[in-house]
Every structure is written in C-alpha cells, then in structure tokens.
Image (tube, rainbow, N blue to C red):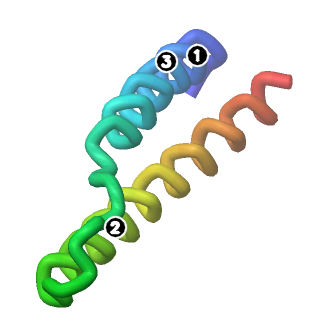
Amino acid sequence: MNDDEKRARIRDLDADISRLRAEVPAPSADATDFVDAGQNLAAREELAGQIEALENERRRLREELG
C-alpha cells in the first residue's frame, strides 16, 4: 500500500468511525427491563469493539506515514 492509498484508507476509516459513533445507542434508562438493557449493552459493546479496531488501524497507518 503506497502513501496515497494509506491516506485514502485513513479518510475511509475516519468516516466509518464517525458513522459507528453516531450509531452507538444511549444507555438504557429503564432499569426494570433487564432484557432490553442487556441487548442495549451488548450492542454498545459490539460497536465499541468495532470502533476500537478501526482506530487501531488508523493509528497504525498514521505511524507508517510518519
């Protein structure tokens, strides 16, 4: 991957990270429905993991570019 491709990938990663952050649901305010709260938590954790993986790739590419 050359430098231009790395820069393009970083731009794609930035867009993906922003989109995923916008999709993260707010914590459930209704503590009486444990099933919904658990599903909400699982969704937030899954998105957080995806965001972390993309941020790690972005950081690696930036380091390679110097």
Q: Nearer the viewer, residue 22 or 66?
A: 22
Whether tag 3 and tag 1 are in contact, CB under 8 A, the answer is: yes
Residue 64 falls in image quadrant: top right
In front of the other: label 1 or label 2? 2
Residue located beneath label 1 in the image? 7
38 over 12 or under it: above or below = below
Q: Amino acid at mark 2?
A: Glu
Q: Residue at x 22, y 73 (%)?
A: 30
Residue located beneath label 2 in the image? 46
Q: Residue at x 32, y 50 (%)?
A: 24
| Inter-mark Cα distance, 1 to 2 | 26 Å
| Inter-mark Cα distance, 3 to 1 | 6 Å
Whether tag 1 and tag 2 are in contact, CB under 8 A, the answer is: no
> Of the residues under marks 1 and 2, which one precedes in the sequence?
1
Q: Nearer the viewer, residue 61 or 46?
A: 46
Q: Indicate the position of residue 52 as horizontal and vertical percent values.
A: 54, 55
